[in-house]
Image (cartoon, rainbow, N blue to C red):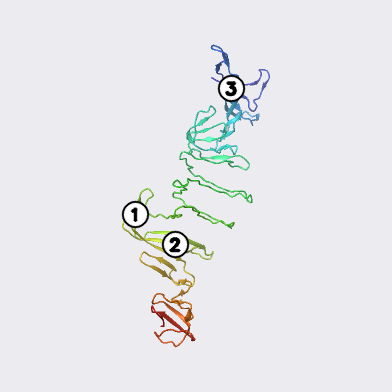
Amino acid sequence: MAFVRRNGNGEARQVTVANDETSLDFYNTQESSGPGTVKEWNYPARIGSKVDPTWIDPQNNTQGIKNGLFFNVVDENFANIEHRMYSNGDTTFNTSGGGTPITLGYNGVITGDGGGLSNIAGGTYGDSNVVTLMGAFGSNTITTTGLITGDGGGLSNVTATTTPGGFAGTIQFNNSGTLDGDSRFQFSPTSGSGTQPAITLEGAIGSAPGIFSINNGVLAMNTENLSGGYAPMSFSTYNSGGYMEPINYYRARGTRSVPTAVVAGDIIRNERVQVYSGSANFTTTNTYAGGVTSTVQANDGLGNVAVQYQISTAKPANGPNSLDKIVLDTEYVQAQGNIEMVTKSAVFSAGLVQQPSYLFANLPSGISAGTRSFISDGATVTFRGAAAGGGGDFSPVYYDGTNWRYG
């Protein structure tokens, strides 16, 4: 069966023009005033072909007419809602009669009015104006309100055509929906607009927190001229109890799905500091400048693990060959390299001990035997003799549990 449309008449034929339609109408009947009485619908559902709205006859018979397809549906208020497929491969729903137009592009891009693509969630069916898309889009629906709903995993390209383009609402994934493929989120507010881009993950208070997971990926943050009291990474925790664990470093051998136990020598570098050393550094411009490292010393497989914790700095240009570092071992605390430890009363630097001196009268009493100090007003200084003030000698003293003595 074929349907041919020809404009004009037998003597005066006319050319085809934009939006010329060749169609079939479908009528249904309903009871009007009683059994046996029927009335045709005033408006039919319709299907057919239409010439593209932008087509102009080129007066060249080597070029075909840009001809697409369309269909109309009728709602309970007798409104005709048109959906149209164009010759370039694009399909637009709700082209006229109501609803928000949505286009499924030949290039695989879904475009809307910039505000209608705000809900992406598990959809329901039953509305008479819902068109179901199968195949590459999974099992998704497009409704007359301009909202796309589906299984949350089949929308590979979603863009908007407003000026400026983008979503005026939110994107929501339900039923464990994911954003797969070469997905990318980009926040680029207009320069000087005062807009602060933000991603917020809201979880329930208590045992159901929001979780932001990166698997086999890297979280890279770059800041430039950061000001306003902001830090590149900030943790604020509020806990009614005394235990808090804002950061946890986990180390295992094996794989994520099948982890195996750590062994002696395994390292966790909790923190690594690098600085830009300058372009003259031909080895690497990003030079190691210290950090914090945890090293497994032993593991009995029963939950008893010995770990050495090391805080280190980079070797200074005129410093020793080894790194300056503090080692917190399971059996000792060790300071290595050119370390200077400063307290209220003494300075330890390069093997020398510097400490303040007292007047004899200001020395404390009732302290532990063996405590040492210096006095600046010693008198009649003799080794192990009882110390006394009022003189002019600078002398070391020690406390024997009862008296201060020279020595």
Measure the C-alpha gap from mark 2 to mark 1: 22 Å
Q: Position of residue 120 (x, y in %)?
A: 52, 38
Number of residues whose C-alpha sits closer than 10 Å to that of mark 2, classed few (under 14), some (14–19) or many (20 or more): some
- Look at the numbered discs 1 and 3 and tell me whether their residues touch, using CB distance below 8 Å: no
Q: In the rendered structure, which amino acid carries the disc numbered 3?
A: Ser
Nearer to us of marks 2 and 3 is 2
Q: In the rendered structure, which amino acid carries the disc numbered 1?
A: Ala
Does residue 225 appear to the left or right of 356 in the view shown?
A: right
Q: Name the residue under label 1.
A: 261
Residue at image position (58%, 40%) is: 160
Q: Name the residue under label 2.
A: 292
Name which of mark 2 and mark 1 comes first in the sequence.
Answer: 1
Q: In the rendered structure, which amino acid carries the disc numbered 2?
A: Val
Figure check: 259 above or below 297? above
- Look at the numbered discs 2 and 1 and tell me whether their residues touch, using CB distance below 8 Å: no
Q: Where is residue 398 in the image (x, y as percent from the top left)?
A: 41, 80
Q: Element type at marker 3?
A: strand
Q: Pick whichever, 7 or 22, lies toward us.
A: 22
Number of residues whose C-alpha sits closer than 10 Å to that of mark 3, classed few (under 14), some (14–19) or many (20 or more): some
Number of residues whose C-alpha sits closer than 10 Å to that of mark 1, classed few (under 14), some (14–19) or many (20 or more): few
Does residue 325 appear to the left or right of 303 in the view shown?
A: right
Q: Is residue 285 visible?
A: no
Q: Pick whichever, 380 or 165, lies toward us.
A: 380
Q: Pick whichever, 156 or 38, lies toward us.
A: 38
Name which of mark 2 and mark 3 comes first in the sequence.
Answer: 3
Q: Position of residue 47 (x, y in %)?
A: 56, 24
Measure the C-alpha gap from mark 2 to mark 3: 76 Å
**Disc on res. 98:** none
